[in-house]
Image (cartoon, rainbow, N blue to C red):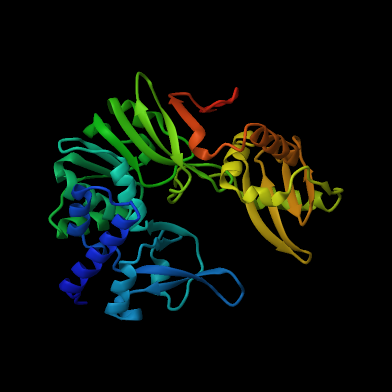
Amino acid sequence: MTVDGERSVERRAALADQLQDVGDIRSDAWRTAFLAVPREVFVPRFYEQGTNADGFSAYRPITPDTVGVDRWLDLVYENTTWVTQLDHGDASWGRSGPQLGTPTSSSTKPGVVVRMLEDLSVDRGMRVLEVGTGTGYSTALLCARLGDGRVTTIEHDAVLSERAGQRLAGLGHRPTLVVGDGADGHRGGAPYDRVVATYSPAHVPAAWIEQVVPGGEILVSVAGGLDTYGYVRLTVGDGMAEGRIIDGDVSFMPSRAERGPELGPLMRVAREHRLSTDGRASRFEPTLLDDRALRWVCQLFVPGARTLRDWDEKGAQQWFLDPDGSWAVVEGARVYEGGPRPMWARLEAAVDWWERHGRPAIDRFHLRVTADAYTYRVDGAEIEWARQL
């Protein structure tokens, strides 16, 4: 494959202009780094998501061979997240046509990547730990901005780490690459001035706090249980880190180590009990849950619960499943619930709280993390949610 270097530079510059116009690129330093890193090096192949004839998500392989070099390069420089791995491996690349599977690695849209790096507020001389190497694209941007010796990056998947290292070396970059659990950080390179996570953990690991200098910062998108995210900048103090959530717009792949409960067994039990359960009208309009700020509040009232959408002969269903066996399902305007703790009643309590406090947006929440607990509080509200780790 031969890529026209001039066309690559043109597309990179056009995307940089686009990202600068919307405020993702906000400084000359990060624009310079962005222009120095060819994204195509890190996404030589990827998947475009669509649906198959049965309505299931299917992923069409995109390579220079499948769509042509020009079209492939155009897609590389779209401000789009591209899936780069299905089901933790390469088996799907050996098959032709659209593939079924679960995305397990991706190249995040460049606008999110560079916005997060801008939010990191780094200066020359700072040491950064990146948690989640992935393709290596954001690592290359960090190297271009800070220098290779200031960047340490850790990746759970040894194959992905090796590939990223080869791609980085091809551009002349040799940061410290580590294979391991991102939650452990990397003590060998500590202390760091910044930690930036390019996956979304359910909580902020204590190791990150321990490995950052006092006054240093951790930038992470924390995953909530109900398909919500809290993008937060935490300042590290004595044995803790705290900060205000910036927004809920930034999300990444979930942690590989933090596997949630198996939903299949929970769903089977819930479905069985649903058949003998009388429904009732909800005290709130279920479509309110489309509001991400409300879902963020709800996941604090039902910690550990998961939600998924399903269908039966009557139409769409929205399920809420708790590892303790509690469950609820919305079918049209009626709800059904069961298990040891009424699930929908707890969601109704969450909506009541949200309404009483003026429907607070996600950026009114603060997070404080210590070695054994994390606590959320809200501006102007006499309530805290604390959870032991």
Q: Is residue 269 visible?
A: no
Query: Relative to 206, is 382 on the left or the right?
Result: right
Q: Residue at x 54, y 39 (%)?
A: 361
Res 54 → quadrant: bottom right
9 or 69, which lies in front? 9
Residue 125 image offset from top left, x and y in percent = 15, 36
Work out whether 300 lies above or below 380.
below
Residue 42 image offset from top left, x and y in percent = 27, 61
Q: Is residue 163 visible?
A: yes
Query: Relative to 219, is 193 on the left or the right?
Result: left
Work out whether 18 lies above or below 113.
below
Residue 169 image offset from top left, x and y in percent = 16, 56
Query: Relative to 322, is 139 on the left or the right?
Result: left
Res 352 → quadrant: top right
Q: Residue at x 38, y 37 (%)?
A: 183
Residue 291 image offset from top left, x and y in percent = 60, 48
321 or 110, which lies in front? 110
Count numbered badges in the picture: 0
5 or 338, which lies in front? 5
Q: Residue furthest left?
A: 172
Query: Relative to 92, is 143 on the left or the right?
Result: left
Q: Residue at x 16, y 72 (%)?
A: 6
Q: Quadrant of the N terminus?
A: bottom left
